[in-house]
Image (cartoon, helix red, strand yellow):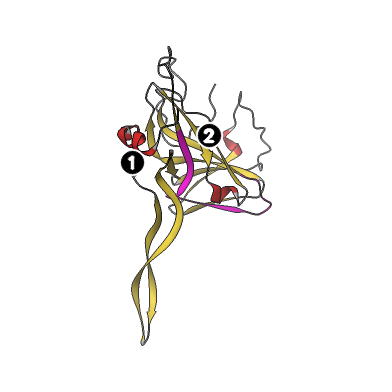
Amino acid sequence: MVLADHEIKLRHGMITPFQPTQVKTKVITRNQEGPEGGVYLEEAVVPIISYGLSSYGYDARLGAEFKVFNNLSGAVVDPHHFDSQCFVEAASDSHCLIPPNSFALGMTMEMFDIPRDLMVICIGKSTYARCGVVVNVTPLEPEWRGQVTIEISNTSPCPAKVYVGEGIAQFIFLKANAVCEQSYADRKGKYQDQRGIVLPRL
């Protein structure tokens, strides 16, 4: 069974911070030239890629740290022997630019604490998908806790921009018919309680 918005609200403690409505705009302050010269500050409401509670899921926001793939070192991407030189670290409070046909790792601004009777899957936002930007996140298992590492692929032949503090992916909460015998916490999973961007582990 997929949890509806009112059911997710009842379990809002599993997402921190929790936004109980869809946010589709933000207020920005910019310099504006006055009619007689001079400059004054003007507030404007601008559209953003939405985040917050949706009908049957939750749209999480993109955090401000990134690891962008590069092949300058000639390293091989190998999950058994991962070389951190495959990535260039970047941080920004506004956006990340992903090279053509490349990818970056990001993270959610939100922390998740998944209950034992839920399994969570993630899908990308349609606005990014229409730009050739694909988001991949593996399932959040029962009793997994942490900040989600987001894999963002730019499948287009052009550089792609992703925006910090705006929606990056929707999380869908599936309620099980029965509680599992062994949760992620019981198995002492290797990505438990992760913070920031976490690289592959064995």
Measured in 3D between alpha carbons, the distance from the residue under mark 2 to the one under mark 1, in whole angstroms, is: 20 Å
The residue type indicated by label 2 comes to Val
> Furthest residue to the bottom?
36
> Furthest residue to the top?
181
Q: Which mark is residue 137?
A: 2
Q: Is residue 160 magenta?
A: yes
Q: Position of residue 140 (x, y in %)?
A: 46, 28
Q: Position of residue 1 (x, y in %)?
A: 45, 27
Question: Hey, which quadrant is residue 30 in on the image?
Answer: bottom left
Q: Is residue 37 above or below residue 87?
A: below
Residue at the image point whose x is 46% and y is 20% from the top: 189
Which type of secondary structure does the marked residue at label 2 adopt?
Answer: loop
Which residue matches tag 1? 18
User: Which region is colored magenta?
Assistant: 154-172
Who comes first in sequence, dot 2 or dot 1?
1
Which type of secondary structure does the marked residue at label 1 adopt?
Answer: loop
Q: Position of residue 71 (x, y in %)?
A: 66, 41
Residue at the image point whose x is 64% and y is 44% from the top: 102
The residue type indicated by label 1 comes to Phe
Q: Which of 140/202 is in front?
A: 140
The count of marks equals 2
